[in-house]
Image (cartoon, rainbow, N blue to C red):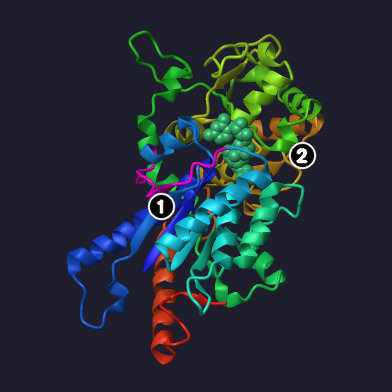
């Protein structure tokens, strides 16, 4: 069986890495044990990683490959930034060529970014032969719904799910959503969360990060480096277009965090989109950004938001270390809501909706909306909360990727047995349109 896994943007890398690790594990088992007679499941999987290049900076992409032990992509499409239409179209054009050359039996897409939808669409419409066979499309993190179609990710989620053949779901709400949309239960597999697989794999290694020292977050660290108590700090991420592309919306959120900033330092790794808006809106001095420089100064303070510590976007291990030790996380990201739930860290989500309701049910996450009064109230409540001995959501146990690879092998075997019954109709795992 040949699988192509697609990554493109920052939140894809930690979701794809465990799947590649599980494929390698499968292959190592086979080379150690050999292939027994009649043991068709024990065939090695051929795998290639495809990077669309939606994200391209070292700190949005490159550093994740080393932190997560990802292999070098077999193909890099190098599409870069653009409008939604341009970016999606460029990925589609280039990915079609890759598919026709590689002719995989499975295409794995993860998450909800433009690369996810673009590659799923290409795979759904490709024809490898006169019978119209095409690869199986496996969507990892299927079924999540914010019910807000003004979010580009919601469009990507819905469309990707509806052209996929195997839908790997992270939480119960996903099962329900897919059933409500009429997707056949045969296609749906509740496997858990591969992003949490990565978190559990790298949680200890994140302790080797020196980011707390770099940002001077050790309360009593003396000159000789002893006394390593960590001070109470909050961690902030903001990059949703609806939050940062409009000056008054953005300022309103920052105002909502003023009280918090008066009590605790707020570490704010700034996304390139957000950094660009800070410059456009003339907020550099308030936020301690240096003029038109490409990179914000670390730990430089501004006039109005004195306690905000701006950094570049961080590597996976540095960010995980900061998240683990934060007293509070404020975010508009999807994945961070889940990671804080797993770590038992109080989180305030500055959005009107979430596609990850399990994080609210578990109590670690509150949905504050985007109005300053509501943000202030939610922050006040969450500042005093602690979640010790938090029970992880069902199947967030580090085994999701292994379940996915097992399901892919199972599907492959089923297709092979069908093929032996009707060889003219189905070629390997490829699906007939
Ligand atoms: C994308 C995803 C979003 C995800 C986010 C994580 C879509 C629709 N959105 O949003 O779901 O949460 O990634 O970061 O796919 N830029 C750089 N360097 C880079 C990449 C981007 O400077 O390596 C800048 C460019 O100016 C670009 C802007 O960031 O125009 C936005 O990048 P883009 O990929 O369009 O969307 P994100 O906001 O990152």
Above/below status of 280 relative to 344: above
- Local packing at callout 1 (Cα closer than 10 Å; few below 14, some 14-19, many 20+) is many
Left or right position of 18 against 432: left
* Labels 1 & 2 near each other (Cβ < 8 A): no
Q: Which label number is shown at residue 369?
A: 2
Left or right position of 6 against 359: left
Q: Which label number is shown at residue 293?
A: none
Residue 197 seen anywhere in this rendered image of the structure: no
Q: Secondary structure at mark 2?
A: loop
- The picture quadrant for ligand 1 comes to top right
Q: Which residues are magenta?
A: 67-80
- Local packing at callout 2 (Cα closer than 10 Å; few below 14, some 14-19, many 20+) is some
Q: Which label number is shown at residue 49?
A: 1
Please state, as top left, top right, bottom left or bottom right, where the C terminus lies in the image: bottom right
Of 265 and 31, nearer the camera is 31
Above/below status of 270 relative to 6: above
| Image quadrant in which you'd find residue 364 | top right
Within the magenta stretch, is there residue 181?
A: no
Above/below status of 17 relative to 166: above
Left or right position of 32 against 129: left
Q: Residue furthest front?
A: 130
Where is residue 426 shown, x and y percent of the image?
46, 82
Residue at x 24%, y 60% (from the top left corner): 28
Front tag of 1 and 2:
1
For marks 1 and 2, give the CA distance.
37 Å
Above/below status of 164 relative to 71: below
Classified by dominant secondary structure, the portion drawn in magenta counts as loop
Q: Residue furthest bottom?
A: 421
Residue at x 44%, y 75% (from the top left corner): 429
Q: Secondary structure at mark 1?
A: strand
């Amino acid at each position: 069986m040949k699988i192509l896994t697609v990554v493109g943007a920052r939140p894809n890398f930690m979701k794809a890495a465990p799947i590649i690790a599980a494929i390698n594990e499968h292959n190592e088992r086979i080379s150690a044990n050999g292939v027994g007679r009649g043991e068709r499941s024990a065939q090695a999987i051929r795998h290639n990683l495809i990077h669309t290049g939606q994200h391209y900076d070292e700190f949005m992409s490159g550093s994740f490959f080393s932190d997560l032990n990802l292999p070098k992509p077999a193909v890099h499409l190098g599409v870069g930034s653009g409008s939604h239409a341009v970016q999606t179209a460029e990925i589609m054009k280039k990915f079609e060529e890759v598919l026709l050359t590689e002719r995989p039996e499975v295409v794995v897409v993860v998450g909800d970014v433009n690369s996810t939808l673009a590659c799923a669409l290409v795979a759904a419409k490709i024809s490898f032969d006169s019978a119209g066979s095409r690869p199986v499309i496996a969507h990892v993190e299927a079924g999540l719904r914010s019910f807000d179609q003004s979010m580009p990710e919601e469009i990507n989620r819905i469309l990707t799910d509806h052209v996929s053949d195997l839908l790997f779901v992270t939480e119960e709400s996903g099962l329900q959503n897919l059933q409500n949309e009429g997707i056949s239960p045969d296609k749906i597999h509740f496997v858990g969360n591969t992003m949490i697989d990565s978190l559990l794999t790298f949680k200890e290694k994140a302790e080797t990060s020196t980011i707390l020292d770099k940002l001077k977050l050790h309360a009593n660290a003396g000159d000789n480096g002893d006394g390593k108590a960590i001070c109470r700090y909050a961690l902030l991420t903001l990059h949703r277009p609806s939050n940062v592309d409009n000056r008054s919306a953005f300022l309103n959120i920052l105002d909502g965090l003023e009280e918090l900033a008066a009590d605790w330092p707020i570490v704010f790794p700034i996304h390139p989109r957000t950094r660009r808006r800070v410059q456009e809106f003339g907020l550099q001095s308030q936020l301690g950004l240096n003029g038109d420089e490409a990179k914000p100064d670390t730990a430089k303070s501004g006039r109005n938001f004195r306690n905000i510590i701006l950094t570049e976007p961080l590597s996976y291990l540095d960010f995980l270390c900061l998240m683990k030790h934060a007293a509070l996380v404020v975010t508009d990201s999807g994945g961070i809501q889940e990671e804080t739930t797993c770590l038992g860290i109080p989180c305030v989500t500055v959005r009107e909706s979430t596609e990850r309701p399990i994080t609210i049910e578990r109590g670690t996450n509150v949905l504050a909306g985007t109005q300053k009064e509501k943000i202030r109230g939610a922050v006040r409540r969450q500042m005093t909360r602690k979640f010790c001995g938090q029970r992880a959501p069902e199947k967030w146990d580090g085994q999701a990727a292994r379940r996915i690879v097992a399901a892919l092998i199972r599907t492959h075997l089923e297709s092979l047995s069908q093929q032996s019954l009707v060889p003219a109709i189905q070629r390997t795992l490829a699906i007939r349109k």
